[in-house]
């Protein structure tokens, strides 16, 4: 494999699905770890891609908003086996975590007592440790200079001092405009000379559909009598389209959509997010849980499936829409400047969410803070898997409560 957009019909779709399904069952450790799993599976072992092509696709997944590791899976599947291969990769990689999260939601609905169990408190403490680690790991990479650190600090202070429901989206938009007006200068990027052979008509259609849904869904929600599920779909679609910097960033966006509206109560929201940390696969599978336990109908199994589709769809449309044009886009100085400042704002956004609502809702006593610190140190050491730490927090939280 050496060309972005070409594919081999010799790889069966079933093989693509099973390969990504296996990765989805074993890929613990978050988005950064997923990249290692992908390279080992599809470059080193199966040799479906060269290192050069893998690097190009990885750069594309990092450039776009959305769930980076899932978009990389779609890109690999598309390059290896066309559009059907991209869908097979998407379904295979996301299916294990999605099924488990929906099952967990159904279990909670079947037993009201589960919502009040003491172990839920431990899961919320685990979220503190997981998100703190995400902020610390992201900050040096996304805020490498004084400008990025200032943007992150302004976003952090602004969201804490002026907590408004649309604050996250405003912060991302302002950072993008800053990068557009006050442009950074970059050296010419090193991109491989891979050709683009995919259908540009199909790509343009995906981008048009993305724009229509992104702009049209908010308008539809204004129509009197529209079912609440349309508001849910609008919130999920916008969240999926505006996630920069990694899957953890979707937490404050989804919390702002689901908790203030009463679709999901705060304890239930953070309990599900805590469980998600103990599972392999993409964090966006959290949408399956939210759709299962939310109050608007359809919920339960159907709601979980609908919400998963709504949150993952923007990332799919973006990767298919930009893939044929990537070599040209990656050299655009203006786009790179905007993206750098948006990424810096993401650090401030996630840090603000770490304080409120995560810390505020999880930490009540010094013992809670001590457990959160111990969990963070365990995760940061990289010697203890995240899922082990989450389970340990759940057990300790139950003991402390």
Image: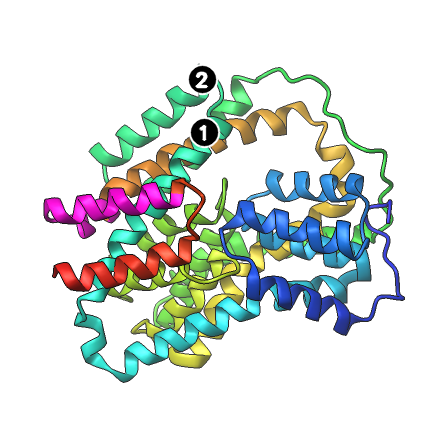
Q: Position of residue 134 (x, y in %)?
A: 41, 41
Please give the label number shown on residue 344. 1
Report the span colored magenta.
358-379
Residue 42 point in image, percent of width and height? 74, 54
Q: Residue shown at 27%/44% (left/top)?
A: 374
Task: Please report the residue visible at 10 percent of the width from the left and 47 percent of the height from the top.
Answer: 365
39 left or right, relative to 349: right
Q: Nearer the viewer, residue 123 or 86?
A: 123
Please rate how many residues cluster around mark 2, counting C-alpha atoms within 10 Å: few if below 14, some from 14 to 19, many from 20.
few
Q: Residue at x 39, y 63 (%)?
A: 231
Residue 365 lies in the magenta-colored region: yes
Circle 1 crowding by C-alpha within 10 Å: few under 14, some 14–19, many from 20: many
Residue at mark 1 to residue at mark 2: CA–CA distance: 9 Å
Q: Nearer the viewer, residue 82 or 164?
A: 82
**Quadrant of res 184:** top right
Examine the rendered structure and indicate whether residue 109 appears above or below residue 173.
Answer: below
Any part of residue 284 in sight: yes
Q: Provide the major secondary structure of the magenta segment.
A: helix
Q: Which residue is mark 2?
A: 147
Quarter of image, res 170:
top left
Write the residue at 35% across / 68% down.
224
Pick whichever of labels 1 and 2 is earlier in the sequence: 2
Dot 1 and dot 2 residues touching (CB under 8 Å) = yes
Disc 2 on helix, strand or loop? helix
Judged from the image, the secondary structure of the residue bearing numbered disc 1 is: helix
């Amino acid at each position: 494999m050496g060309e972005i957009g070409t594919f081999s019909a010799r790889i069966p779709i079933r093989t693509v699905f099973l390969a990504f399904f296996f990765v989805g069952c074993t890929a613990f450790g978050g988005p950064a770890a997923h990249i290692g799993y992908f390279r080992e599976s599809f470059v080193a072992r199966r040799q479906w891609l060269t290192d050069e092509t893998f690097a190009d696709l990885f750069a594309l997944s990092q450039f776009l908003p959305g769930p980076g590791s899932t978009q990389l899976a779609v890109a690999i599947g598309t390059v290896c086996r066309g559009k059907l291969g991209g869908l097979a990769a998407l379904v295979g990689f996301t299916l294990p975590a999605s099924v488990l999260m929906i099952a967990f939601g159904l279990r909670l609905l079947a037993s009201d007592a589960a919502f009040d169990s003491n172990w839920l408190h431990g899961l919320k403490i685990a979220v503190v440790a997981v998100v703190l680690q995400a902020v610390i790991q992201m900050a040096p990479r996304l805020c490498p200079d004084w400008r990025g650190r200032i943007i992150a600090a302004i976003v952090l202070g602004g969201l804490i001092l002026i907590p408004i429901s649309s604050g996250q989206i405003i912060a991302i938009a302002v950072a993008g405009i800053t990068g557009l007006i006050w442009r950074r200068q970059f050296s010419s990027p090193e991109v491989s000379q891979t050709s683009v052979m995919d259908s540009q008509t199909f790509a343009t259609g995906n981008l048009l559909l993305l724009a229509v849904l992104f702009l049209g869904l908010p308008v539809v929600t204004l129509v009197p009598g529209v079912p609440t599920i349309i508001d849910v779909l609008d919130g999920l679609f916008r969240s999926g389209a505006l996630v920069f910097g990694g899957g953890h960033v979707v937490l404050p966006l989804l919390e702002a959509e689901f908790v203030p509206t009463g679709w999901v109560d705060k304890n239930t929201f953070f309990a599900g997010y805590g469980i998600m940390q103990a599972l392999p696969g993409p964090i966006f599978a959290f949408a399956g849980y939210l759709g299962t336990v939310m109050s608007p109908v359809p919920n339960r199994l159907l709601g979980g499936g609908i919400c998963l589709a709504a949150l993952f769809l923007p990332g799919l449309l973006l990767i298919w829409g930009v893939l044929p044009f990537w070599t040209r886009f990656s050299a655009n100085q203006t786009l790179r400047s905007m993206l750098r400042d948006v990424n810096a704002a993401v650090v401030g956004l996630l840090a603000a969410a770490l304080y409120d609502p995560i810390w505020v809702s999880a930490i009540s006593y010094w013992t809670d803070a001590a457990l959160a610190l111990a969990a963070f140190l365990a995760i940061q050491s990289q010697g203890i898997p995240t899922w082990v730490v989450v389970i340990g927090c759940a057990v300790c939280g139950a003991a402390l409560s």
